[in-house]
Image (tube, rainbow, N blue to C red):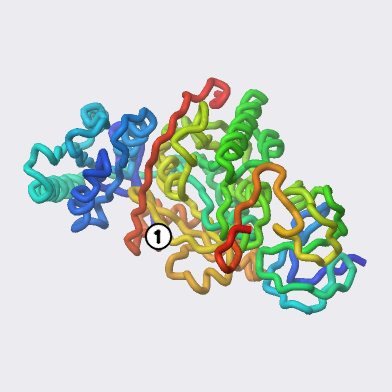
Amino acid sequence: MSMQGFLRADGRKGIRNYVAVAYLVECAHHVAREIAYPYRDRAHVIGFPGCFPNEYAQKMMERLCTHPNVGAVLLVSLGCESFNRHKLEQVVRDSGREVETLVIQRTGGTRSAIAKGLGFVEQALKTLQTTPTVAMELSDLVVGTVCGGSDGTSGISGNPAAGRAFDKLVQSGAACIFEETGELIGCEDIMAARAATPELAVELRNSVEKAARYYAELGYGSFAAGNADGGLSTIEEKSMGAYAKSGTSPISGMIKPGDIPPKGGLYLMDVVPDGPVKFGFPNISDNAEIVEMMASGAHMTLFVTGRGSVVGSAISPVIKIAANPDMYVRLHEDMDVNAGRIMTGEAGLDEVGDEIFDMVADVAAGQPTKSEALGHAEFILTYKSFEPIGPACLPV
Amino acid sequence: MNRTDDRLIVLAASDTVAVVRSAIGEGERLWISGQEITLERAVTMGHKLARAPMRQGDKVLKYGVAIGSVTEDIAVGAHVHLHNMKSDYTPTYALDHKGAVV
């Protein structure tokens, strides 16, 4: 399949052309869901549940509503929440996208808001049929990676195989993002040694030390009970497995959620908030991490799982990589790639890495992933606060 | 002689643990680092067995790096997990099969 991208006004290219239906407070979630549901393969629900203002959430919603995979946006507001819907609407309009804001308290309630929203989506989908498409290269892609439901196999089969695919993508000029600094605890030294500059090495190390302090104060590491059942004993052990997803390329930079990689290369995303611990756990579940990489422009995410996660994502496809061969047998309908063959000796890391790399190109060309075909469109966004990255994070 | 069972993977030469590639039953005999041992308890895929004797306070090495510290002496072939090692960073949270926090 040849890659054709949906051309956006900022020059970025999308691999999908969704209508985003965005609720701006939990109170508007139901209306948003009802509006998107009849068109759920082409209209996806995203949103922020909180009623209190939050700069991070504002930035994330701005980035997500102007994501290259999104062609038009319907904002759904209750009417009295603190979210700055005017600013968000302006940002989306300035991006050249069709946008409308539905305020439930003004439209006469649930029923009339849904009817009005359905009208917008139907009309927007017609307009999106005329979105210009252009040839797209691997170097136009931003690809994220995450692991979830990890076990003792993840760090031996799925994660290093994803790392091989990342190496090939970086060589092809793509921007690749790995993240979850809380799952890099113990890897500081070997990771810092891969930094493009000594100043970046300091930033990488600081980000992991920040994560270690943050989790220590919370009393739990980024470690779920199922990880231990699967043979993982400590956060450092889990980290070494997670770290393998980054491959072996030099690390070009460090970004925070919503920062768009300026060029191809490998980037670490620092996902742990700055300042004193507040708002609770940094990323309460895997989709929170996927959402942050999407906000940084990720067209798709490689998701390695040992225990067997079934999630997908709104607006960006998720390629599910099974690390554990026994789990693959049980959950193969949810898995795109069987990296468990590395455990049984049926395939090598390079072979599975090539398979993942080829699949990235196919999915970019329009082939639906398993989770997409099953209708998975999970989304979660919660409170955080960040300082902007310093100049050492993105060396030129 | 450094004979090691095919059902185990050694990830780095300096490692003091090997990873179980497929489930091994209680009482089975297997070779690890040239020693024949009898497995004291069944282990499933992804778990670790000691390939070197370890003393309390030693670092457990996997992928060639420390993944935690030994909390009680470990013999070659023993299952290495929450009962005999711990994190050097944050404690590990786990549930047993009845749902109790261990």
Q: Is residue A351 left or right of residue A9?
A: right
* Residue nearest the observer in this picture, A149 or A293: A149
Report the side of A85 relative to A311 (left or right). Answer: left
Relative placement, left or right, of A129 versus A305 is: left
Residue type for callout 1? Thr
Q: Is residue A115 left or right of residue B21?
A: left
Expressed as whole percent of the image width and height from the top left, the position of residue A385 reads 44, 30
Q: Quadrant of the N terminus of chain A?
A: bottom left
State whether residue A276 appears in this view.
yes
Q: Which residue is mark 1?
A: A369
Numbered disc 1: secondary structure: loop
Q: Quadrant of residue A131?
A: top left
Vertical position of residue A351 compared to residue A190: above or below: below
Residue at x 51%, y 26% (from the top left corner):
A275
Residue placed most toward the observer, A232 or A296: A232
Q: Position of residue B86 (x, y in %)?
A: 72, 51
**Quadrant occupied by the C terminus of chain A:** top right
Tell me which residue sits at (64%, 31%) in the image. A205
- Residue A93 is drawn in which quadrant? top left
User: What is the chain identity of the residue bearing mark 1?
Assistant: A
For the residue pair B66 and A241, the one nearer the viewer reads as: B66
As drawn, the residue found furthest toward the front would be B100
> Relative to A32, does residue B7 appear above or below in the rendering?
below
- Name the residue rendered at 36%, 49% in the picture: A379
Numbered label tally: 1
* Residue for point 47% across, 50% down: A286
Q: Position of residue A371 (x, y in %)?
A: 39, 60
